[in-house]
Amino acid sequence: MNRRSVLLLLASAGSLGACVSQPLRTGSLDGASSAPYTLASGDRLRIIVFGQENLSNIYAVDGSGRIVMPLIEAVPVAGMSTSQAARAIEARLRGGFLREPRVTVEIDAYRPFFILGEVTNSGQFPFVNGMTVQTAVAIAGGFSPRATRTTAEISRPTGDGIVTASVPITAPVRPGDTIVIKERWF
């Protein structure tokens, strides 16, 4: 009888040890969250060339990270900020087309975010400013009955590659992030 009690106690202690939540690894995303926004494939840009109404329009960043404009054709903008993209377009226009081009680049629509796992509707959704993991889950129709409701895994493309970390559901989401909602065990 005594052996049975000890084995039962050890088995229950082992089960409870599995319930202890793991520490969140957010250090790797902290630098990526505070970095300025850089353009990438999927962004739509509103480009205004002052005094040139036929060049001012909305342009999409294509799969290779470029925008295609009349006269100057393809301009690589991936990895640039909006002000850097404006300077690159000005430099191209200055090369034989306009004397003193003045260009403004604004983001018309951010690239989408992706959400997978234990949500009602996984997939690709439009990004909304100020979004957190919790609002992303709401956009995806809410948690499934088996979902972990306190943490998520975010994969974020950075200049150094893709960074993945476990974060609380109050963590901010950036355009292009992939969110995975894991299944809970109990």
Image: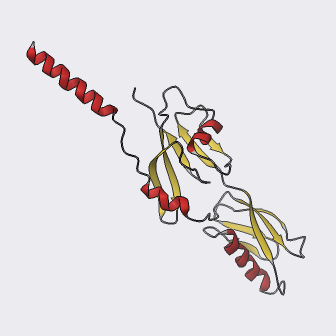
Left or right? Give the position of 70 relative to 138: right
Left or right? Give the position of 54 relative to 152: right
Does residue 100 lie above or below 47 as drawn?
A: below
Q: What is the quadrant of residue 142 in the picture? A: top right
Q: Position of residue 59 (x, y in %)?
A: 77, 63
Left or right? Give the position of 171 relative to 83: left
**Which residue lies at the image location 68% right of the left edge and 49% below the top edge?**
128
Left or right? Give the position of 165 relative to 57: left
Pick out the residue farthest to the top: 1
Q: Position of residue 176 (x, y in %)?
A: 60, 53
**Which residue lies at the image location 52% right of the left edge and 42% below the top edge?**
169
Q: What is the quadrant of residue 50 in the picture? A: bottom right
Pick out the residue farthest to the left: 2
* Residue in the foreground of this view, choosing between 137 and 162: 137
Q: Position of residue 91 (x, y in %)?
A: 73, 82
Coloration of the structure image: secondary structure
**Which residue lies at the image location 89% right of the left edge and 70% below the top edge?**
54
Q: Position of residue 184 (x, y in %)?
A: 43, 31
Q: Quadrant of the C terminus?
A: top left
Q: How many marks?
A: 0
Q: Quadrant of the N terminus?
A: top left
